[in-house]
Amino acid sequence: MLNTQSLPSLAARGISAPGYARGGPVGVVHLGLGAFHRAHQALVFDALLRRGNARWGVLGVAMRSTALADALAAQDGLYAVQVANAAGVHWQLSGALWQTCVAAREPSQVVRALAAPSTRWVTLTVTEKGYGPALAGLLVQGLAARQAVGLGGLTLASCDNLAHNGRKLQALCIEAALAQSPALAHWIAATCAFPNSMVDRIVPAATAERLAAAAQALGVADQAALGTEAFWEWVIERRFVDADDADTLAAVGVTVVDDVGPFEEAKLRLLNGSHTAMACIGAVAGLPVISECIAQPAIHQFIHGLMTVEVGPQLSRPDWARYRDALLARFANPELRHRVHQIATDSSQKIPQRWTPSVLGALRTGQPVERLAFAAAAWMRYLRGSDEQGQGYAIHDPMAEQLQAQALALAHAGDAAATVQALGTLSAIWGEALPQEARWLARITHWLDQITQLGMLAALAQLNTHLTPTLETP
Ligand code: CS2
């Protein structure tokens, strides 16, 4: 099994070991030990540590699940990441995780770490649904302990796919602190920094195949191995407790800006918006992974049109067309095997960031919404819980029970308009204004009918023929 003892043999295989001392007091507490953090921020911290900056060792906190935290602990926090793009594949070892624990099992360890003098940063990847009172309670307990012993504040960087993620986290913490003591809330507002940040790297959940490839490449088993693409981007707002962190992070490739807004908007709506659309389409059509979706000419044309005609023109990121082209290539990466069902998980929490603002913007400016309506219809079809080959699948979503019951009841009645009336008017997903837009609801109904009658890909081909790019491309 991979651990500190394996490092010399890995070096012999051309995999460079972290050449720095590991295991001192950590500088970063990270909440949410999923694949994304381990293949993104943790590798940035590993790069800083490799440059001799010992302040970026991480305590990796799993919120609930114990298996991964324990597997990592047994491996001394070491794990390998397979990085793949058209140029080739290589393995990289991360030494940034110095300790791991589980918030639900060892909450006091998390609070102690938050209140430790060495801790300077908190990063979070707790997913959209994680931003609730439990998270705020944990953070505020740690911050209160810092205040009580006279320590300074922390930089708390949300790395979740939420618009204005730093501001949301700040509001959540200050609200929770206010319930305890106005002085604490004031202290947090005055001493802690909550930068907005946009993080981007496609990191699928690990598979048995990936773990087998890791064992082969490393010569030892690695239960925490991952695969990812070569591309990564971290754009973070210049808002740190220690202003010097801006240069430190920039030196290893992080982009520090005054306003993350244009980057996060483009990423959520182009990358994540396309992802959720392909996830629903692919799940219903029986296409298991994103690279197989985008390899279908009808889906490629649809996603290109969605980004070019309906989403891109609204964005303020100036180079969005270049970002779009890069995305089409990234989606096609055959090594990633990014499962559509993984991306379709929690769609009710994702659509409000990924689609709703684009629909509203397009309606406001008189742009077409045909492809967005198709995506919404694909999601409603997806919620029935079985694909076009009759294969059933589970819907993993905090609203699953309600959503699936509605999708199924109405599907049996064969009434697309009633389905759209039920699922297209949920304000938690679509806001207050969209459920009033009769034209929008009518287009979803049209496509849901077509998908039901013709099948997903045939309906998509029909949409593509009707929306010829020459008429629409600006
Ligand atoms: C994906 C994201 O699972 C999902 O919802 O859309 O995890 C996506 O891969 C990342 O945000 C890419 O940066």
Image (spheres, rainbow, N blue to C red):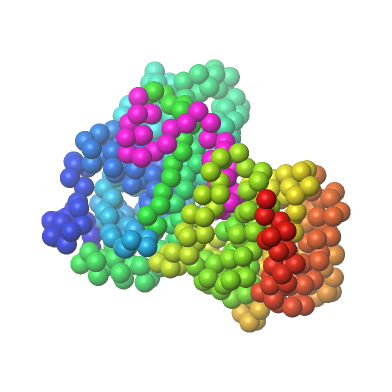
Can residue 142 be seen here?
no
The image quadrant where one finds the N terminus is bottom left
Look at the picture and state if 51 lies above or below 427: above
Snapshot quadrant of residue 393: bottom right
Q: Which one is nearer the viewer's eye here, 471 or 20?
A: 471
Q: Answer with left or right where residue 77 lies relative to residue 102.
A: left
Is 364 contained in the magenta span?
A: no
Q: Which one is nearer the viewer's eye here, 178 or 230?
A: 230
The magenta span reads: 244-272
Q: Position of residue 298 (x, y in %)?
A: 62, 70
The residue that appears at 76% across and 43% down in the rendered structure is: 365
Question: Looking at the magenta stretch, what is its main secondary structure?
Answer: helix
Snapshot quadrant of residue 303: bottom right
Look at the picture and state if 233 lies above or below 116: below
Furthest residue toward bottom? 389
Q: Position of residue 163 (x, y in %)?
A: 59, 40
The residue that appears at 43% across and 57% down in the rendered structure is: 203
Look at the picture and state if 258 lies above or below 72: above
Q: Answer with left or right where residue 377 lies relative to residue 141.
A: right
Q: Which one is nearer the viewer's eye here, 258 or 73?
A: 258
Q: Position of residue 412 (x, y in %)?
A: 80, 75
Look at the picture and state if 301 lies above or below 52: below
